[in-house]
Amino acid sequence: MSNTSESLPCRPARGLSASSSGPLPFDTSAIIPFPDFTVDPLAFESGLDASRSPWWSQRTSAPYAILVHALQALTSTRSRIAILSILTNLLRVLVAHDPDSVRPALYLLSNSLSPAWEGIELGVGGSIISKALQTTTSITPTAMRALYKKHGDPGDVAYYAVVGNSSAPRTSVLRPHPPLLIQSLYDDLRKIASAKGEGSQKLRQTLVEKLMLSAVGSSWKSGQSSSYVDLNPHLLGEEPRYLIRTLVHNLRVGAVRTTILSALARAITLTPPREVTISSLEGPQKISSADLNIVKGVLQAQGPSTSPRKGQSSIKRGQSEEFTNAYERVQAALKQADTILRRAFAQHPSYDDVVVAVLDQGIEGLLSPSSRAGLALGTPLLPTLGSPMRSLEQIYELLGPQASWCAEKKYDGQRAQVHAWRENGTITARIFSRHLENMTDKYPDLVHLIVNTMEADNTLDSFIVDAEAVAIDPSTGELRSFQELAGRARKDVQIADIKVAVCLFLFDMMLLNGTVLIEKPFRERRRLLQTHLPPTKSLATGNTDENIPHKYVRATLDHVESIDAQEGRDAVQEFWERAIESKCEGLMIKLLDDTVLTVDDQDEQGLDDTMEMEIDLPSPQKPSGKKSRRKALPATYEPDKRTSAWLKLKKDYVEGIGDSIDMVPVGAWHGNGRKAAWWSPILLALYDSERGIFVAMCKCMSAGFTDAFYKELNERYPIDSDTCSKSPQWNVETGGYQPSVYFKPSEVWEIRGADLTVSPTSVAALGLLPDSRDKGVSLRFPRFIRIREDKNIELASSPTFVYQLWVKQESKGGTRGGVDEGDLVDYIEEEEAIEDEYESEGDPG
DNA sequence: AGTGGCTGCCC
DNA sequence: ATTCTGC
DNA sequence: GCAGAATGGGCAGCCACT
């Protein structure tokens, strides 16, 4: 086995002067260096001697250091295969030697502490981290800011604060600390999360500092203890780095949910937990130890010459048929395990339950009826998402004439996955957000509505439905803005206190009366939804709910408005226009029936074929001359199988709909992470010609910025130059924004967004909004389109122009708004006329 | 009691 | 949410 | 085409401070 520490740069300990304080509290003689996780998992030895834990003391559970060892390896590569190998090998070691650490390790890897719906929040951010770093290391605030600007990562700041650099050693830890363990670190993070009430911020900080000291102490111990041979010197300073990254929920090692799940599936398959005997395994994903040994033997014989750094299984040509067959069987088994685990997680996204199942019964455990890891009432499944489409035209091209599909209005509200069931005569309802947070407490009005609906219909026993909760006018049912919905209270909400009425627009049904529907075609699911959960009576005819006094704002239930494609293309076009006019974001396109298309490859060039899945052709020999293939378009609700199963068409994606705004870059911040060397985001402003000043409107980030663009920006706005200063020097009002640097207003950018918003931060059009004179106008989802080379800064959009756009936006979707469209058109035409005039001057051709 | 900073969540 | 990038 | 990273506006909730 190759020793990773030999091939990685070993950072010397500097300035770690302190007296050693005796032997460590455990026997170190049995410990060997951490293994090289980058090797191909099929050649990796996770077993060694299973009777003890060879990589750490047998009296302790797995150290955090072995996780950090893997994280460091992950950081050194971007190869997906290598990343998967490293994680697989790490998890195999844990499965073999400390299965209790598997679950906490998965949480530490995934920037979370529990399933989202349990609502456990760390409550630690940059502020506490910053204070903790200053007390646990001797770093000055100035040095810390400089490190942060340079590296754009608080974990990296911690690293350099601990190990120092060639000119400035920084650590101040004076004595060894017991090493962090995966399990105890996880437990400590849960303690931090549970701190609340007066003094909780201080307590959080103290707990973070303790963890830092342990992480730093491990480094110190490794470097200094004379009674201890440092077996993993490459880890010096790394525990603080990843501890801090974990605390800010941003590990940045190129692996989040999908890769972690793949690695877990592979780990469990290659290293079955002790409780699972190989012979007990059945089914297609069973892996034979004979195959495994053949593969391992050959791969290990090939040795480290086969690019071990990348962890790729480079099979030399000319291997025996025996090897090739065994290898393919093993790969097939791994792939199958991967599929089973990912499907299980999509339906039951809880590491807690999934890990219990696989440690107990292997991957098989996920298929067993007794497993808790299936679709379950009360546990949200991952939502099906939509992939963006640029036009109706594109949708028609993609789906072709045969497919049956429908278009639904895409309302601008909040995704709501609703579970409801009876248990011992009691009805329970829960509401989950898109990211599976439990929002039940935010919507007591919806809960009441759902419970009432079930009480009124005793054929309804249980259901899971997908819906959008949207703010509405309680008397007319007219749609209200997302911002109004966002203003609702979230905790301890009493129905009597609710100010903003909501309508729950249902659009899918995943379970009904105990029957799982997600594999049924949408046409069937939609029929069941519409049959079993009819809309509440319209507001105009009176809500029949007697349990809520009339004076209260009440929730309503409805189905999303939709149109089937068979109504014809003109009807669909008209529906799309109507959707936009009624304050919807656009459309969602969904297949009604499973469809098989014969597609000409040439016809689909440049198209997004996310909805398509290749069918395994029965003939093993594909005709090479013909370019047509058959494709399956499933109409099932299968979260995560296809990453975006539906198509979404939003107005702001479509050329020619919505307005763009011409803004001037007037400031910027230092980028984070991979953008640490660049300006990002950029502060953008309008030009107020009456006052001769620029007024900040929004920030703009990578959207539309390529890396090349960032480099050019660095050249145009080098720090401390006549175009870029740390102090404000130009006529710019920044409002609530505080950029790190100010740019000299010099160029005009065309910016687009989805909507204009009333903003407490922006000072664009400040004073013009009739009901909120102290607020400006900003932009939702701002994105850079292009530089307006043809415009000088005096021709940037004006506050009045933006105000008029806002008025136009607000006047949509009903009778409210009270502006004269005629005036508006005049105004906008006037502005465009000025622009045209300028363009004709600047471009005589 | 009011305000401001921080955090996490929605889109 | 959106967009870009490397694999 | 997938998977990951880096970033937008803006809200409530919570806590610390005045």
Image (spheres, coloured by chain):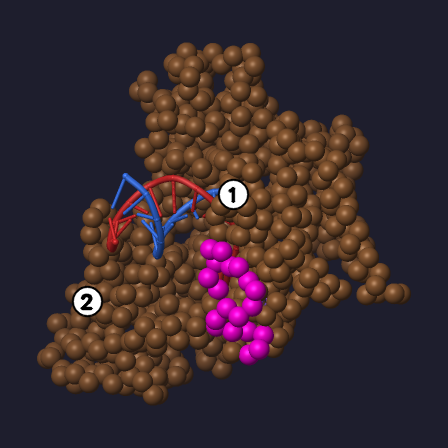
Chain colours: A brown, B blue, C purple, D red
Mark 2 Cα shell of 10 Å, populated few (<14), some (14-19), many (≥20)? some
Residue type for callout 1:
Arg
Residue at left 49%, top 45%?
Answer: A774
Mark 1 Cα shell of 10 Å, populated few (<14), some (14-19), many (≥20)? few
Secondary structure at numbered mark 1: loop
Label disc, if present, on residue A253 of the rendered structure:
none
Residue A679, position as x, y percentages in the image: 54, 69
Residue at left 61%, top 29%?
Answer: A816
- Whether callout 2 and callout 1 share a subunit is answered yes
Does A727 lie within the magenta span? yes
Residue A597, position as x, y percentages in the image: 74, 42
Which span of residues is magenta-colored?
A: A721-739
Residue type for callout 2:
Gln
On screen, residue A59 versus residue A669, left or right, reads: left
Residue at left 55%, top 36%?
Answer: A481
Which residue corresponds to mark 1?
A773
